[in-house]
């Protein structure tokens, strides 16, 4: 059940949309709380100063569990203490005093719970069926705040259609400790509020504060609507992070990406679909290059942070060019494409191949699986964005 402290933060008993938002976050090791900003938080779970993947995983799990059972801040504080002791984490801000530890745990818990609650509300209020009857939204400043933010007070009562740009940058919470909230109202009530003057915002409401990069009155990093950008390109967001992280952290982060947003469909399903429908042209993301130390020399470039993809043409090429040859080579089935990531990242042999038709380097990876030998060729796609090793071809040899 939610505690008095939880209710003071502006949220009560957690609900499924909130829990899903928290659970589906990627665990992103980071040094500072502002290493990622605004809508990127829709897809990333961070705790400032936590660069150990296993420590971050335990903290994330604790936050999710407290959201599920609604046990509240005190329960999370016990979790935090046990997790810190388990991992030997020292040097964190707030360590060493009862007040400091209380502050740090409150910040972690409150920020995650309030933003996830807000994101869940966004999901509920944005539902087309809800918008049919409640197309207007209203900003509500919490009563009883001892030291209210003046800008937040000025926004109290503002009522506008859900499409108004204000909601994208001023959706509560609008800073650490902010207890404001947004509610939905009916068309009749919304129109009446607008006629009464509640549809007007103070001058300069969308001015950007140079010191934060967010609207004036909105805390640094809070100038976004939690939950409105859950479709942010998470894989692209973390690609540069993988390049800058130490290998052990990069490996753990890449695995977490694969676990949460590996792809929109299984490789077997994708292969079957592109073979049946030649109009499909998009590639399938299957993971990140994990075996950086062995793949980089063969690729002729550092491949930390590189995607591994299956272009739509790859299964078609394999079907046409590498079927049964009567000499131990068998045709690849859609299910065989499930092995692509493993063939590269857990290969028995990796070497450089011939240049591709596009003049790019290629990597040849060989792995024995259940007595069969898989030989896959990947094209190295460099560049500033969407760096990848893209499957070109795959041959499967059966035991003689």
Image (cartoon, rainbow, N blue to C red):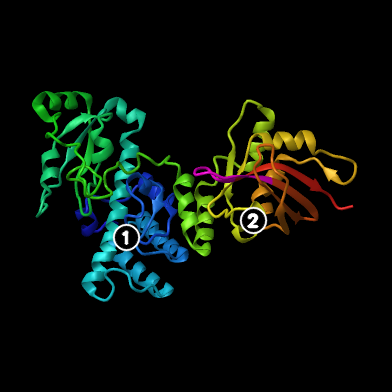
Using the numbered discs, state the Cα–Cα distance from disc 2 to disc 1 in whole angstroms. Answer: 46 Å
Q: Is residue 31 visible?
A: yes
Q: Which mark is residue 295?
A: 2
Q: Residue 94: horizontal and vertical position, in percent?
A: 26, 70
Quarter of the image for residue 75 reads bottom left
Report whether 284 appears left or right of 115: right
Q: Which mark is residue 311?
A: none
Q: Residue furthest front?
A: 359
Q: For the residues carrying marks 2 and 1, which lies nearer the camera in this image?
A: 2
Q: Nearer the viewer, residue 370 or 305?
A: 305
Residue 80 vertical position relative to residue 9 in the rendered view, above or below = below
- Residue 15 sits inside the magenta stretch: no
Q: Which quarter of the figure is the N terminus placed in?
A: bottom left
Q: Residue 53: horizontal and vertical position, in percent?
A: 46, 63
Q: Residue 289: horizontal and vertical position, in percent?
A: 59, 53
Q: Is residue 72 visible?
A: no
Under tag 1, what secondary structure? Answer: loop
- Residue 382 sits inside the magenta stretch: yes
Residue interval drawn in magenta: 378-388
Under tag 2, what secondary structure? Answer: helix
Identified at 68% across, 44% down, the residue is: 337
How many marks can you see? Answer: 2
Q: Nearer the viewer, residue 25 or 242?
A: 242
Q: Which mark is residue 71?
A: 1
């Amino acid at each position: 059940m939610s505690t008095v402290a939880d209710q003071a933060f502006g949220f009560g008993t957690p609900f499924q949309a909130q829990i899903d938002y928290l659970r589906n976050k990627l665990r992103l090791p980071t040094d500072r709380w502002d290493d990622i900003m605004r809508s990127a938080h829709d897809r990333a779970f961070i705790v400032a100063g936590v660069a150990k993947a296993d420590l971050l995983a335990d903290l994330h799990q604790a936050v999710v569990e407290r959201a599920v059972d609604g046990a509240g801040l005190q329960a999370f504080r016990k979790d935090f203490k046990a997790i810190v002791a388990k991992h030997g984490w020292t040097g964190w801000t707030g360590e060493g005093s009862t007040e400091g530890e209380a502050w740090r745990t409150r910040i972690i818990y409150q920020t995650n719970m309030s933003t996830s609650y807000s994101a869940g509300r966004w999901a509920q209020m944005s539902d087309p069926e809800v918008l049919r009857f409640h197309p207007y939204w209203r900003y509500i400043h919490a009563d009883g705040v001892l030291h209210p933010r003046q800008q937040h007070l000025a926004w109290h009562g503002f009522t506008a259609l859900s499409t108004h740009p204000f909601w994208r940058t001023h959706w509560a919470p609008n800073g650490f400790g902010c207890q404001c909230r947004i509610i939905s109202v009916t068309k009749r009530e919304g129109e009446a509020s607008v006629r009464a003057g509640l549809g007007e915002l103070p001058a300069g409401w969308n001015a950007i504060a140079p010191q934060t990069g967010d609207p004036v009155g909105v805390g640094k990093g809070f100038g976004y609507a939690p939950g409105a950008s859950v479709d942010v390109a998470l894989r692209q967001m973390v690609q540069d992070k993988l390049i800058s992280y130490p290998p052990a952290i990069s490996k753990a982060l890449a695995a977490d990406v694969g676990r949460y947003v590996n792809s929109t469909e299984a490789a077997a399903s994708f292969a079957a679909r592109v073979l049946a429908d030649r109009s499909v042209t998009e590639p399938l993301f299957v993971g990140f290059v994990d075996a950086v130390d062995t793949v980089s020399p063969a690729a002729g470039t550092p491949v930390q942070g590189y995607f591994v993809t299956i272009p739509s043409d790859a299964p078609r090429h394999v079907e046409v060019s590498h079927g049964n040859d009567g000499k131990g080579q068998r045709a690849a089935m859609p299910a065989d494409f499930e092995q692509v990531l493993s063939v590269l990242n857990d290969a028995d042999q990796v070497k450089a191949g011939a240049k591709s038709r596009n003049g790019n380097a290629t990597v040849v990876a060989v792995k024995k699986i259940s007595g069969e030998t898989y030989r896959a060729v990947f094209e190295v796609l460099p560049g500033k964005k969407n760096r990848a090793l893209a499957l070109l071809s795959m041959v499967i040899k059966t035991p003689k």
